[in-house]
Amino acid sequence: MKKILISCLMCLLVLSLVSESQAMVGFGLKGGMNSSKIIFSPAADLTNQDYLKGLSFGAFMNFRLGPISIQPEILYSRRGLEFQLPVITLNYAAGSEYYENYTAKLEYLEIPILLKLEIMPAGPLKVYVFGGPSYGLLLKARLTRTYEGTSETEDIKSDFKNSSLAIVGGLGVDIKVPLLFKVTIDARYHYGLFNILSDTSSLKDITDKARNNGFSIMAGISF
């Protein structure tokens, strides 16, 4: 509830800044790829933990105040983790070790509120840095187990909290296309601030806390 209140207050701050200034308002669409991982503390005993590749896409508004702009976004983002667990079976020779593959997919509706600062304007091309908080609402959480060509999927949403809070930061470039639109490309880092495990999570048998972490490359157009 506190996180939702903080996000609402930030939205109100954005609106008040815009109303009191001669801001240029833009709207756009963007999409890209996440490379995300769930970081456990203490480290969970999972084999070959790896980043999960997933889509991210949505819309944004940009309120430009000279070289500084405020950009609220609303994005669908898939986060999660890939890992393996050893399996023992009588079908194989003694001493051999085989693994089951697991994919945890967490689907979020994320609302970043970013502060952008132009650092290298050069005609139609503008380079900027940006950063700000990102509130996430968990939509789905699923775990898929794959072994010997068969897959099973289960719902694990109850293992995670319904919301999350992160800090997002990165570097981007805007390219102005005369009389048409603006192309935007950015690379960003997503750092989860708080534990995303629910109080009744079954994962608490192997760890105490978990948070989302990862990188994204996104591209879009704005008008």
Image (cartoon, grey):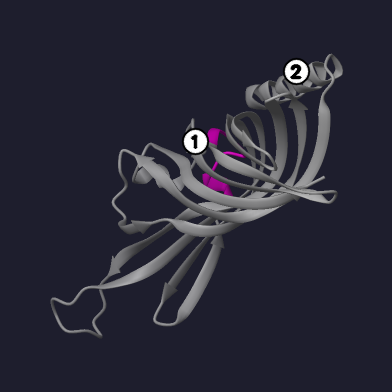
Left or right, residue 48 beside residue 101: left
Q: Crowding near pointer 1: few (<14 within 10 Å), some, many (20+)? A: many
Question: Which residue has dot 1 on it?
Answer: 192
Q: Crowding near pointer 2: few (<14 within 10 Å), some, many (20+)? A: few
Q: Which of the two residues, 38 or 91, is positioned nearer the viewer here? A: 38
The residue type indicated by label 2 comes to Leu
User: Quick check: is 162 in the magenta stretch?
Assistant: yes
Q: Which of the two residues, 94 or 58, is positioned nearer the viewer here? A: 58
Left or right, residue 219 beside residue 21: left
Question: Which residue has dot 2 on it?
Answer: 13
Tell me which segment is drawn in magenta. 157-169
| SS assignment at label 2 | helix
Looking at the image, which residue sits at the far top? 20
Residue at 81% in and 41% down: 27
Residue at 82% in and 45% down: 223
Occupied quadrant, residue 12: top right
The disc placed on residue 148 is none
The residue type indicated by label 1 comes to Gly
Q: Position of residue 155 (x, y in %)?
A: 58, 58
Residue at 42% in and 64% down: 102
